[in-house]
Amino acid sequence: MIAEDAIRVLDHGFVRLDDAMATDLSVVNAARVSFARRKEEMEEADEGLIRFLMRDRHGTPFEHNSFRFHIRAPIFVAREWFRHRVGSFNEFSMRYAKATDDFYVPELEDVRSQVGKPGAYSFEPVDDELAEKTREEFREVYQHAFETYERLVEAGVARELARSVMPVGAYTEFFWTVNARALMNFVSLRAAETAQREIRRYADAVEQFFAAKMPVTHAAFVAAERVAP
Ligand SMILES: Cc1cc2nc3c(=O)[nH]c(=O)nc-3n(C[C@H](O)[C@H](O)[C@H](O)COP(=O)(O)OP(=O)(O)OC[C@H]3O[C@@H](n4cnc5c(N)ncnc54)[C@H](O)[C@@H]3O)c2cc1C
C-alpha cells in the first residue's frame, strides 16, 4: 500500500518524506553563529544571505538540517542512488524477507533507443511495436525469474541465495536520511538531463519535498543554476 502523502514514481514506486527537521532559518542561524547572533524568524535580508551563501558556495550552513525519505524504487535506481555517500541508508533485506513480485515495466513512451557516443547519448523513442514487444519481454523474464525464486525458496534454498535470480528491475525499499547540502548535490546530478530517466523522476520528487520545506534555499539553488554549494 502506498501512503497518501507519497509522490508516486514509475509503475510501483514512490518517494515519501518520513520526517524532516529542515527550515530556511536553520541556514541563516548556522551562518550567523559566526557573529553570535540568532533569529527566531526569517526576514528579507536573510533571503539575501542565503542567496549569497549559495552563490559563493559556503556550503556548511546548509548541513544543519535533515530529511528522512522512504523510497520504493527498482534495484537499478537504488544502486545509482547509493553511490551518494553523504547520507545514510537502510534497505529492505532479501535475506530476511521474501522478495517482492513488483517489477519495473516502462511505459510505452519510456522505451527508448540510445543514440550517439558515451558522454553524449541521446535517447530517442522507438516505434510502438518494438515498445510493446520490449514490455512483453520484460514481463516474461520477470515472471520466469520470480517463479524460479519462489520454487527455490519453497524447496528449502535460503532466501539469501535464491535472490540471485532476481533481476535489477525488481523493486526495493529504503530509508535515506540526508542534509540539504548533499540533497542539492543529489538533485543537481540526478534531476539533470544527463541522468537516467528513471532516477530523474525520483530526483524530481525529492526536489518537490525539499522546495516545500526550504523554499528560500530551493529558490537560491535554482537561481545559482542548480549548482550545489
Ligand atoms: C549522469 C551520471 C553518470 C554516472 N556514471 C557513472 C559510471 O559510469 N560509473 C560510476 O562508477 N559512477 C557513475 N556515476 C556516479 C558518480 O560518479 C558519483 O558516484 C555519484 O553521482 C555520487 O556523487 P557525489 O560523489 O558527488 O555524491 P556524494 O558521494 O554524496 O558526495 C557528496 C560530495 O562530498 C564530497 N566527497 C564525498 N566523498 C568524497 C571523497 N572520498 N573524496 C573527496 N570528496 C568527497 C564531494 O565533494 C562530493 O561531491 C554517475 C553519476 C551521474 C549523475
Image (cartoon, helix red, strand yellow):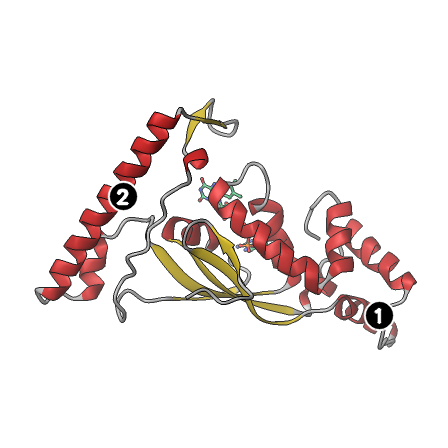
Q: Which residue is mark 2?
A: 139
Residue 42 lies, with reference to residue 196, above or below; the image says: below
Q: Residues within 10 Å of mark 2 (few under 14, many from 20)?
A: some
Q: Nearer the viewer, residue 135 or 145?
A: 135
Q: How many marks?
A: 2
List x then y, in percent, for residue 95. 26, 67
The residue shown at (81%, 67%) is 28
- SS category of the residue bearing label 2: helix
Mark drawn on residue 32: 1
Outermost residue on the left side: it is 155
List x then y, in percent, for residue 11. 42, 50
- Residues at marks 1 and 2, CA–CA distance in whole angstroms: 56 Å
- Quadrant of res 94: bottom left
- Quadrant of res 137: top left
The residue shown at (27%, 43%) is 139
Outermost residue on the top side: it is 116
Q: Quadrant of the N terminus?
A: bottom left
Q: Nearer the viewer, residue 157 or 16?
A: 16
List x then y, in percent, for residue 111. 41, 34
